[in-house]
Structures are given as C-alpha cells and as structure tokens.
Image (cartoon, rainbow, N blue to C red):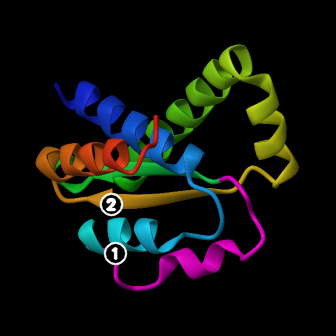
Amino acid sequence: PVALGVAVGLGCGFALGWHLRGCFSATSKSLMAAMGNSTGEASVMGEGEKFKMVLVVRKDLKMGKGKVAAQCSHAALSAYKQVQVRNPSLLKQQEYCGQPKVVVKAPDEDALMDLLNHAKEVGLP
C-alpha cells in the first residue's frame, strides 16, 4: 500500500509537472498554494525553463529523506523511459531546457487526488 501511494503520488506529480509550461503560471501557483507550499519554492527554479518535472511526495507516508530520494529517483527514471517511447520530441524539448525537476509535498492521498482532478480540469493529460 505504501509503495502504491508513492507511485500514484509521483506519477500524478510527474504528469502535472511535465506539462506545465513556463515558470509556474497563475494556475500552477494556485496548485502550489493548495498543496500547502506558500513559501515561494518555485522561484528557485529559474524563469526560462519551458518544461519541469514535478514530483509530489505524500507527507502522510512518513518516509525518511533517503527513502523519498530513492523513490523520486525511481519515478524520474521511469517517467523518462515512458516519455522516451511515447513522445520523443517532448523529451527532447525537456532535455533542451536542462531537465529541471522540483519536489513538492502533499499532505495526504485526498490532496493528491484533488491535484489530479484539478490538473484534468485545466486540460493537462
């Protein structure tokens, strides 16, 4: 169950981040606020990137930092492999942007599902 929760969280975060364009539009800023991130962490990522991979980690799973790092590494590599097969041109664009990544926290599975639903509402695949 924990691994499934991590996989769902990272998958949703990847899907959201992969398709966000720009530094974080008003919509994605509201998503960050909804996830409890009002500290402006997005400003560290730079202004010029077109694509970002966003990994969402559930806080309720209470994983240690090493476990979170390992799971995020697995998710990033898996996402890379999937996009390499499904949409190589998108992957090339993301690589051109320097492959930026950001990790954000979600308090629980409900918040993660809210994030997924909002991503669908704004037209993200």
Which quarter of the rendering shows the N terminus?
A: top left
- Judged from this view, the residue extending furthest toward the bottom is 39
Q: Earlier in the sequence, mark 2 or mark 1?
A: 1
Q: Is residue 120 magenta?
A: no
Rounded to the nearest angstrom, the CA distance separating label 2 from label 1 is 8 Å
Write the residue at 20% across / 31% down.
Answer: 2
Q: Relative to 2, is 108 above or below? A: below
For residue 42, what is the image quadrant? Answer: bottom right
Q: Is residue 47 magenta?
A: yes
| Magenta-highlighted residues | 37-51
Residue 106 position, x and y percent, is: 26, 57
- Graded by Cα atoms within 10 Å as few (under 14), some (14 to 19) or many (20 or more), the crowding at tag 2 reads some
Looking at the picture, tell me which residue is in the foreground, 89 or 3: 89
User: Mark 1 = which residue?
Assistant: 37
Looking at the picture, tell me which residue is in the foreground, 64 or 51: 51
Q: For the stretch drawn in magenta, what is the main secondary structure? A: loop
Under mark 2, the amino acid is Lys
Q: Is the Cβ of the residue at disc 2 closer than 8 Å to that at disc 1?
A: yes
User: Mark 2 = which residue?
Assistant: 105
Tell whether 30 sits left or right of 81.
Answer: left
- Graded by Cα atoms within 10 Å as few (under 14), some (14 to 19) or many (20 or more), the crowding at tag 1 reads some
Q: Count up the numbered dots.
A: 2
Write the residue at 66% across / 21% down.
Answer: 81
Residue 35 position, x and y percent, is: 27, 65
Residue 91 position, x and y percent, is: 76, 33
Tell whether 26 sits left or right of 101.
Answer: left
Tell whether 29 sits left or right of 75.
Answer: left
- Judged from this view, the residue extending furthest toward the top is 85
